Image (tube, rainbow, N blue to C red):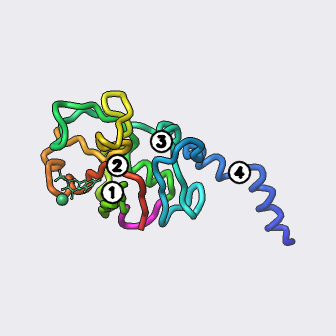
């Protein structure tokens, strides 16, 4: 074994990079609600799964808005899709978002903003059921800007989300 290799190994033991960088992506131990795969690197290249606790451990964003599918103003809390792609070490041009019913849509990575969309897991502070478009819903702060009131944004607003594939 070369000196350089020995040194690299020793360094790897001193600074277990994966443990540091991916600490925010805990493996699912409860019911899996979201699978992330495709061109991702963290915590493994084969993708990973998240349960609700895993999602809640990630940075969260909350906003209030109406939607064309619901009544009144609701408060949505979730993890920004952009954050999730970054945490997963995703590299590519699109995220294919897939729902429980098979509906799928390509969301361009370029179009992801820091705070929109979010993968909402709480509405008015409560988890919501499949019947109510849960447990995960990709939502935008539609009331914040006219640009979110577009057919394209509506098409990205996939409810009953179950899988994200970076391509
Ligand atoms: N899970 C899921 N989300 C979905 C869809 C769907 O079929 N299933 N349709 C999408 C599309 S193409 C649009 S334009 C909006 C609006 O759907 P609606 O016409 O049923 O209100 O929801 C989006 N989110
Ligand atoms: Mo649509």
* Residue corresponding to mark 2: 160
Q: Quadrant of the C terminus?
A: bottom left
* Residue corresponding to mark 1: 101
* Residue corresponding to mark 4: 16
* Disc number placed over residue 79 in the picture, else none: none
Q: Are marks 4 and 3 in contact (CB under 8 Å)?
A: no
* Residue corresponding to mark 3: 55
Foreground mark, 1 or 2?
A: 1
Foreground mark, 2 or 4?
A: 2
Q: Are marks 4 and 1 in contact (CB under 8 Å)?
A: no
> Residue 69 in the image: x percent, y percent?
18, 43
Count of numbered circles in the view: 4
Rounded to the nearest angstrom, the CA distance separating label 2 from label 4 is 36 Å
Per the picture, the main secondary structure of the magenta-coloured stretch is loop
Q: Residue furthest right?
A: 1
Rounded to the nearest angstrom, the CA distance separating label 4 from label 1 is 40 Å
Judge: label 2 CB < 8 Å from ligand 1.
Answer: yes
**SS under mark 4:** loop
Q: Are marks 1 and 2 in contact (CB under 8 Å)?
A: yes
Judge: label 1 CB < 8 Å from ligand 1.
Answer: yes
- Can residue 61 be seen here? The reply is no
Rounded to the nearest angstrom, the CA distance separating label 1 from label 2 is 8 Å
> Residue 50 in the image: x percent, y percent?
51, 47
Q: Residues within 10 Å of mark 4 (few under 14, many from 20)?
A: few
Q: Earlier in the sequence, mark 4 or mark 3?
A: 4
Q: Which stretch did the figure color magenta?
A: 90-95
Rounded to the nearest angstrom, the CA distance separating label 3 from label 1 is 21 Å
**SS under mark 3:** helix
The reply to whether the magenta stretch includes residue 19 is no
**Drawn side of residue 4 relative to residue 121, left or right:** right
Q: Quadrant of residue 79?
A: top left
Q: Residue at x 34, y 61 (%)?
A: 102
């Amino acid at each position: 074994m070369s000196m350089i290799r020995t040194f690299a190994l020793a360094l790897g033991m001193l600074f277990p990079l994966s443990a540091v960088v991916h600490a925010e992506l805990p493996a699912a131990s409860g019911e899996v609600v979201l699978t992330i795969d495709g061109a991702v690197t963290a915590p493994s290249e084969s993708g990973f799964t998240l349960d609700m606790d895993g999602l809640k451990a990630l940075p969260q964003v909350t906003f209030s808005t109406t939607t064309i599918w619901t009544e009144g103003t609701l408060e949505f809390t979730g993890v920004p899709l952009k954050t999730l792609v970054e945490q997963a070490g995703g590299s590519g041009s699109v995220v294919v978002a897939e729902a429980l019913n098979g509906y799928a849509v390509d969301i361009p990575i370029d179009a992801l903003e820091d705070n929109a969309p979010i993968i909402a897991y709480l509405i008015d502070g409560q988890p919501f059921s499949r019947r109510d478009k849960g447990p995960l819903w990709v939502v935008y702060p539609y009331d914040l800007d006219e640009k979110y009131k577009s057919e394209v944004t509506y098409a990205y607003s996939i409810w009953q989300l179950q899988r994200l594939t970076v391509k």
